[in-house]
Amino acid sequence: MGVERMDPDERRGQIISRAQVLFRERPYSEVSNTEIAAAAGVSRGLLNHYFGTKRELYLAAVAEMLSVPPVPVPEYLPGASVRDRTCQSVEGWLELLERNRETWLAAIGMDGPADPELERLLDAARDRLVDHIAEVVGLGPYAREHPEVHALLRGFSGMAEATSREWLKRGRLTRRQVHVFLEETLLRILTGILPRVVEDDGSGHHCAHAGRTTTGTPSPDVR
C-alpha cells in the first residue's frame, strides 16, 4: 500500500502528531525515528526529509504543544474571588501536564547535551505561564510595568515546574498535594510577599519591612 498523498503541511503535522503520542507514552531516549515513521505511515526517508534528526522532530513536537495556551484565563464572574480563579487555573494546568506527562518530563529534563533551542522554547513557555498567572490574579498591566513582579512570578513558575517533577516523575507528591501547594503558595506570594518585594528600596534592610504593607501594590482579594 502506498503512502497517502498529502500536502507538505498536512504531512508534517501528521508526523508531529504521531511523534507527540509516542513521546507522551515513553521517554525521549526510548523512541526511535523508525518507530515514529511507522506510526505516521511514512518511510524513514520521508520522515528524514521533513525532520533531519530525532531531536529536530522532538523540538517541533514540543514547540507545538507549548504554543497552545495551556489554560484559558477564567472569566471575571460576579462573586468569583482570586482564590476561585487561581484554583481553576492550577487545576487546568495540572490536567494539561498529566495528559502530556512524558512530553513534559522530557522537555524539562531532556537527557543528553544542553540544547539552546529547547531552552528557548521552554523559556518562552515560562514567560507565557507568568503572563497567564498575572492575568488570572488581575495583575497583568502591573506586572508588565514592574520587572520585579514578573521576576517574582517567574520564580514561582520555576517552583511549579520542580514540584510537577516531584509528582509526575518521582511520585513523592500526589496531584492533589501539588494543587494545594501551588494554590496556597501563589496566594501567599500575592498577599504577603509581593507587597514587600515591590516596596523594597534596595537597602538590604529587608527585616525592617516586616509587618508593613505597601500602599502602591494591588492587593488581590483572596477570600
Image (spheres, grey):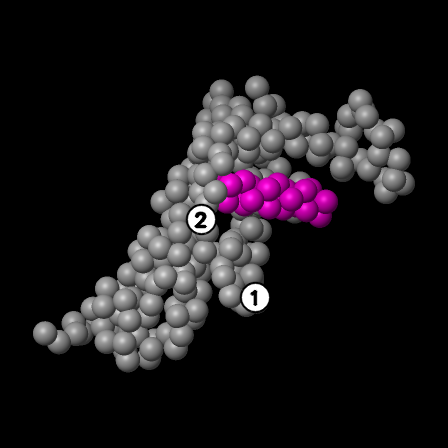
Could you say which disc has been placed on residue 114 in the image?
1
Which quadrant of the figure contains the C terminus? top right
State the SS at label 1. loop
Q: What residue type is labelled 2?
A: Pro
The residue sitting at 22% across, 72% down in the picture is: 42
Residue identifier under label 2 = 69
The residue sitting at 45% across, 32% down in the picture is: 174
Measuring from the top left, give residue 177's x and y in whole percent: 49, 29
Q: In this view, does 77 lie above or below 37?
A: above
Which quadrant of the figure contains the N terminus? bottom left
Measuring from the top left, give residue 112's x and y in whole percent: 51, 66
| Tag 2 and tag 1, C-beta contact below 8 Å | no
Measuring from the top left, give residue 65's x and y in whole percent: 41, 55
State the SS at label 2. loop
Asked if residue 57 shows in the view, the reply is: yes
Crowding at dot 1, Cα within 10 Å, few <14 / some 14-19 / many 20+, comes out as few
Q: Which of 175 and 211 is in front in this view?
A: 175
Measuring from the top left, give residue 172's x and y in whole percent: 49, 36
Span shown in magenta: 145-167
Q: In this view, does 81 lie above or below 150?
A: above
Magenta residues, dominant SS class: helix
The residue sitting at 76% across, 37% down in the picture is: 197
Q: In this view, does 38 lie above or below 22?
A: below
**Relative horizontal placement of residue 142, taking residue 133 as reference (left or right):** right
